[in-house]
Amino acid sequence: MGLVEQGKIPKPLTWLMNYSRKYSLWMYQWGLACCAIEMGAALASPRYDMMRLGVIPFPASPRQADLIVVSGTLTDKMAPALKRLYEQMPDPKYVISMGSCANCGGPYWDSYSVTKGVDQIIPVDVYIPGCPPRPEALLQGVVLLQERIQNEEMGPRWRGEPIIVGQPGAHDHLPETAVAVSSA
Amino acid sequence: MAVTEQQQQAFIGKHLAEAQVAVELQDEDMVLNIGPQHPATHGTLRVVVKLDGERVVAADPVIGYMHRGYEKLTEYRSYPQVTTLINRIDWLSSFANEVPFIHAGEQIMGIEAPPRAVYIRTVLTELSRIATFLLFLGEMGAQVGAITPVFYGFRDREYVLNLIEAATGGRFHPNFNRIGGLKDDVPAGWIAETRRMMDKVFESCDTFENLLEGNEIFLARTKGIGIIPGDVGKGYGVSGSNLRASGVDWDLRRDAPYLAYPEVDFKVWTHPGGDSWSRYWVRLQETREAARIVVDLLDRLPSGPVMAKVPRIIKVPPGESWVRVENPLGEMGYYVVSKGATGPFRVKIRSASFSNVSILPWLLKGVYVPDLITILASLYFILGDIDR
Ligand code: SF4
């Protein structure tokens, strides 16, 4: 769509497309450690049932996914695989970092083999604190992400402009929403 | 010695022929990389398999994607902090992880926990065993294509997690043990509630039995698949339910008693089959047995304090101690060396899953790829427990 490239989409159309996008998030599960079990509980347990928020957790490959949830400890050995698969995802794409380990290294902040935060290698949209966060916290993280998607301008993300991690203002074109879920 | 041209030609010819053979052989095999990010590997195990058609010729598990450096980190933490860390080794049964380390500390210090604390520790260990195995029963169904058991597994697991949360404050990582006892007593009403929930656990075991054991697909996918003979299993250091499913009658709860196990009468379930189905069956029976142990212990819970007299700042005198216990996944042991500081000098961790997956190259030879998935599911390992 030429209009998208120029960033000239009529407001109602933007609203409609964002509205449809936020309720059909195909989520790639990047379950790494303990938090992955809580993510599993949020997805598969009838008590939490994340699919009612429009999150579909079954893309066969990252190429079909909109959202990646990194839950658990990312080690230096695993980090290249995460970066590679993130790069395979089509734009627009979002990242939720779940748990202290994914946020900043968590209990392994001084370990020699753990990457201290996935935001060192891929840009993160929502951080969920906790060790592990309760499944409810993941649900709230998804709701916050949906809020952000709803308020998004369509241009930058859709053009697939590279977001360079660590570059100041990498996320400046996105409207401010609260991006941290209060701890449960 | 000069080499004639003829000899040279013969040499090249011979090697060419060998290379040719190698290339032809290569044609038949395909190398498939499963993982490290694959739902069937329960986290980040990577298995590189060489396939001849659909059959596995050779399999090589690659581990280390979840290596978090526990043994080094423990050298920089004090004893209460180490408990927080080792909770997260085997994240499904965190409480059971804490017990051997705390025991090791108590042994060096010469402290004994009061009887009530010992009983509550046993109850919570068995509860985490139930939570672990309920997830296993669900997963096992999922790996052969039955999705329903997953929902039941997660649903029933919540009941048990609620109990653990009510007593300890954490769903997953309780960090409830202290050297010399427990942080707190159980809350009022907890015992009655636990009894009620154990009835639900029995019910849910029946549900799994009905869902899976009459299911022809489940039987066809698991019976006679992935057989581990008892002596081979022992040779590789396989332990826990995996070994008992191979007909070896070995349970540390009975054979090297710890906690309150000598005072309970329980059955050690074994199955002579050694295949995926036996491993599933043994775990199902052990879930029931664990619920029985819990009910039995709650009936005779002694009263009294839950904490022995210990100094405010824990300093463990020089010494060393080796403690091993029967964790839900198998035999877990801690070798703790203390040099009199507030933290351990060195901790060696023997975790069950590491030894359990070491049998994979032997076990996967000759199986079909779909069976590989069920075998991985039935061995039931936790990546944190493998890589630590
Ligand atoms: S944040 Fe805590 S619970 Fe989550 S993966 Fe890290 S250690 Fe495990």
Image (tube, coloured by chain):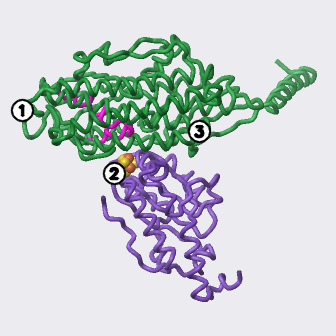
Chain colours: A purple, B green
Residue A72 visible, this orientation = no
Q: Residues within 10 Å of mark 1 (few under 14, many from 20)?
A: few
Asked if residue B98 is among those painted magenta in the image, a careful observer would answer yes
The amino acid type of the residue labelled 3 equals Ala
The amino acid type of the residue labelled 2 equals Cys
For the point 38% across and 36% down, the residue is B131
Q: Residues within 10 Å of mark 3 (few under 14, many from 20)?
A: some
For the point 57% across and 20% down, the residue is B275
For the point 33% across and 44% down, the residue is B172
Q: Position of residue A135 (x, y in %)?
A: 39, 54
Is label 2's Cβ within 8 Å of ligand 1?
A: yes
- Report whether B112 appears left or right of B61: left
Given contact means CB atoms under 8 Å apart, are the residues at marks 3 and 2 in contact? no
> Residue B66, labelled with which disc?
none
Relative depth, front residue between A128 and B291 = B291
Q: Are marks 1 and 3 on the same chain?
A: yes
> Residue B309, labelled with which disc?
1
